[in-house]
Structures are given as structure tokens and as C-alpha cells.
Amino acid sequence: MQRRLLRTDQLLAATYDARASRLEIEFTNGDVRAYKAVPDEVARRFFDAPNPATFWEDRIAEEYPWERATGSRNAAARAGLDALFGAPTPTHPNPKKGDTP
């Protein structure tokens, strides 16, 4: 599954898993939707469309069931920050006087 940039006003990127018939679309607002049971031909036409956002609205949005998916952009951003600054250390939920954070 390769992530392809779309760069429209509404859509940022998408990936398609042919074995699972699953199309994940990342929106510019950060939402990621995973559409289920999307045929290969529909995914191919989506990626090849002159305007993928219009194709999504007309042929995918109302036709296929979807669920929220984990945002790949958020995961990548977190990994980049962790690499730069180190992973966050857990803090004690109820620090006592004299404890160091």
C-alpha cells in the first residue's frame, strides 16, 4: 500500500489496499476515512481522475461504508517529534510534595 498525494482543497492523500479492497483517504482537515469493499477499478479511476475530490463525492462518499482510521499524518508527526526530542516520559498522576517531575 503506497500513500499517494492528491493535493486538492479537500483531499490530501490516499492509499488503496487491493487485497482488503480498502481505500483510505486523508482529508486536509486531518480526518482519515477508510472505505470498505471498494473495487480495484473504482480505486484506479479515483487515483486517475482529473479531480479526485469530485470523483470521491460522486462515486465513493455515499456508495461505500466507511470508518474513521488512524491519521497517518499525525503518527508521522509524532514519530518525527519523538526522534527529535525523545519520547515523552510518563508522569506520576498524583505527585507528592518533594517529587521531581
Image: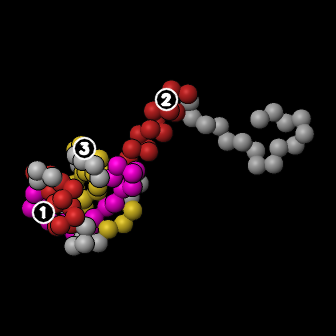
Asked whether, in this view, residue 50 is left or right of residue 33, the answer is left
| Three-letter code for the amino acid on which mark 3 is drawn | Arg
| Three-letter code for the amino acid on which mark 2 is drawn | Ala
Residue 42: image tag: 1
Asked whether, in this view, residue 99 is left or right of residue 4, the answer is right
Assess whether residue 36 is covered by the magenta stretch: yes
- For the residue pair 11 and 71, the one nearer the viewer reads as 11
- For the residue pair 71 and 61, the one nearer the viewer reads as 61
Callout 3 crowding tier (Cα within 10 Å): few <14, some 14–19, many ≥20: some
**Is residue 19 at all visible to an observer of this figure?**
no
For marks 3 and 2, give the one nearer the viewer. 3
Residue shown at 43% from the left, 44% from the top: 75
- For the residue pair 78 and 59, the one nearer the viewer reads as 59
Q: Position of residue 68 (x, y in %)?
A: 39, 62
Residue sitting farthest toward the top? 84
Question: Does residue 29 sit above or below 19 in this rendering?
Answer: above
Magenta residue span = 27-45
Task: State which tag comes first along the sequence, 1 or 2.
Answer: 1
For marks 1 and 3, give the one nearer the viewer. 3
Assess whether residue 49 is covered by the magenta stretch: no
For marks 1 and 2, give the one nearer the viewer. 1
Residue shown at 44% from the left, 38% from the top: 77
Residue at mark 3: 7
Q: Where is residue 62 in the image (x, y as percent from the top left)?
A: 25, 72
Residue 2: image quadrant is: top left
Mark 2 element type: helix
**Is residue 45 at all visible to an observer of this figure?**
yes
Mark 3 element type: loop
Q: In which quarter of the image is the C terminus?
A: top right
| Three-letter code for the amino acid on which mark 1 is drawn | Val
Callout 2 crowding tier (Cα within 10 Å): few <14, some 14–19, many ≥20: few
